[in-house]
Amino acid sequence: MFYNKNKLEKRAALTLNNFIAVFVLLIITVIASPACSEDEKKSAISGSKVDTSGAGDILAEVNGKTIFTNELLKQYNLYFLISRFSRTSLKDLTINSYLDFYISELLLRSEADAFKASITEDQAKKEKERYLKLFRFPDEAFVKWLDSKSLTMEDAELYFKKILILQKLYIKKFGAKKFSDEEVREYYKVHNEYYNRPAKIALSHILICHQESQGCASDLSKDKAKELAESIRKSLTPEKFAESAKKYSFDSTGQIGGSLGVITKGSAIPSLDKAAFSLKPGEISDPVESEHGYHILYVTNKAEELSIPFEDARESIEYTLEEEHITSELLKYSEQIKKNAKIIKYSETDRKGSLDLKEQANTKKSVPPVKQYSTFKVTGKDIYRNSKGQPVIIMFSHIGCSFCKWIEETFDDTVMDYIKKGLIEAHHYDIQTKDDLLTPETENDIPEQYVKLFNYENPNRSTPSFNFGGMYYRLGAGYFDQDDLYAEEMEMRQIIDDLIRY
């Protein structure tokens, strides 16, 4: 990867700490809790149907059944989203480790077929409805949750059908398992933070100090500081907050976009606590006074207070304990089945289904079919190529964006591999400085046609934002919750390879 040294130093100094970003997500994401926020309950996303042809490369074969890239990414996302294992248990789950898990699952499902452990569509639907009720998911929030990984309710019902089939297999092989009251209560005690916790927010601020401020030196009078804070607030938007914090904030957090990390209700200075927790995600406060000066507050995410009594949580805990136990026992059993199974796993270098992309890039181009990928959405537009016929791949980021920091090196390394082979044109633009971070030079302008791509399906100018060949886009980092950069690379390569083939 060829980077200007100053660009690398600039990145390291001016982006949010990755640990804080992961911690924020683990607290705020709906997965980490048996309940949803009010905003999530009100949200509804409508999906569009696309052609699902084009399964990607072959990753493995299990007794003659082929496992493709698309299939594995889809099942990986379903498992991570719907599984009731704790986030601690899933933190080390990667697409690589999941491949072994999925191979075991396929063998177990074949075993279930032999035992005639069948499930009807109606039973699967009822199991999904039971799940939503137990874990307090309104349908519209669940749809939004699935849509974040390009999944549908039909995908979810097939997942629940699979769960019920494996449960039947377990009962036939080992008998039913009941959990004692003591075991259920112990789970509630150990995982109490999932059921009872104060409200939390991810908070950023811009601090303007004055001569009377404590712990903050300034030559401004109190009146002038207030006047400056009010002036800054007038022009502030969420998109400009990190840049403005760097420019104006007297606090050292300004250099990382003003982030204060995760704040628990009641832990901050009373005036700030009251103002911050009255904000909704995406809202910016008017200047709030404290002993340190005047703060402009910006809430990026919020987890509402939870208070779920044991008896209300009992059934969902029993569900979770049953899932963990059955999965553990069946995985042990699958190791026995593997001894007589024919399993072939393909490495990246000898993976079946891959084409000679260099040769494909030099052939006549046709319009590629619209496909469904795990985290990218369809734009509805034709493929966008440069004058050489190469698909144009773009990432947009900005200083202070923790998700950008997490994903940008993987994106840059991936596209550089294709650029060096002359297969694509790619750019990584910082929307604030307008610099292309893939070049050693410092640019100060983004071409208008790329600005239009950025604004398409992105009215809030969110980052990170990706546009692959004009046909596919994504807002945010698709596998941030799994902390799986290899899955990111795998999906990006899958889309780029498909764009090159046509």
Image (cartoon, grey):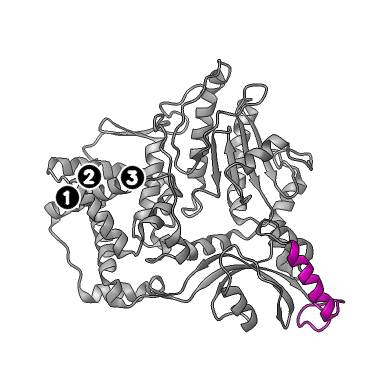
Would you say residue 142 is visible in this rendering? yes
Q: Which residue is mark 3?
A: 155
The residue type indicated by label 1 comes to Leu
Which label was assigned to residue 146?
none
The residue type indicated by label 2 comes to Leu
- Point out the stretch of residues depicted in magenta: 210-235
- In three-dimensional space, the C-alpha distance between marks 3 and 2, rounded to whole angstroms, equals 20 Å
Which label was assigned to residue 108?
2
Q: Residues within 10 Å of mark 2 (few under 14, many from 20)?
A: many
- Residue 407 counted in the magenta span: no
Q: Which residue is mark 1?
A: 169
In x, y percent, where is residue 320? 29, 63
| Residue 137 left/right relative to 422 | left
- In three-dimensional space, the C-alpha distance between marks 1 and 2, rounded to whole angstroms, equals 8 Å
In x, y percent, where is residue 436? 72, 41
In terms of depth relative to the viewer, which is nearer, 399 or 145?
145
In x, y percent, where is residue 317? 29, 68
Query: Which of the marked residues, 1 or 2, is nearer the chain's N terminus?
Result: 2
In the image, what residue occupies the spot 55% across and 81% down? 266
Q: Residue furthest top?
A: 364
Query: Which of the marked residues, 1 or 3, is nearer the chain's N terminus?
Result: 3
Compared with 137, 485 (above or below) is: above
Contact between labelled residues 2 and 1, with CB atoms less than 8 Å apart: yes
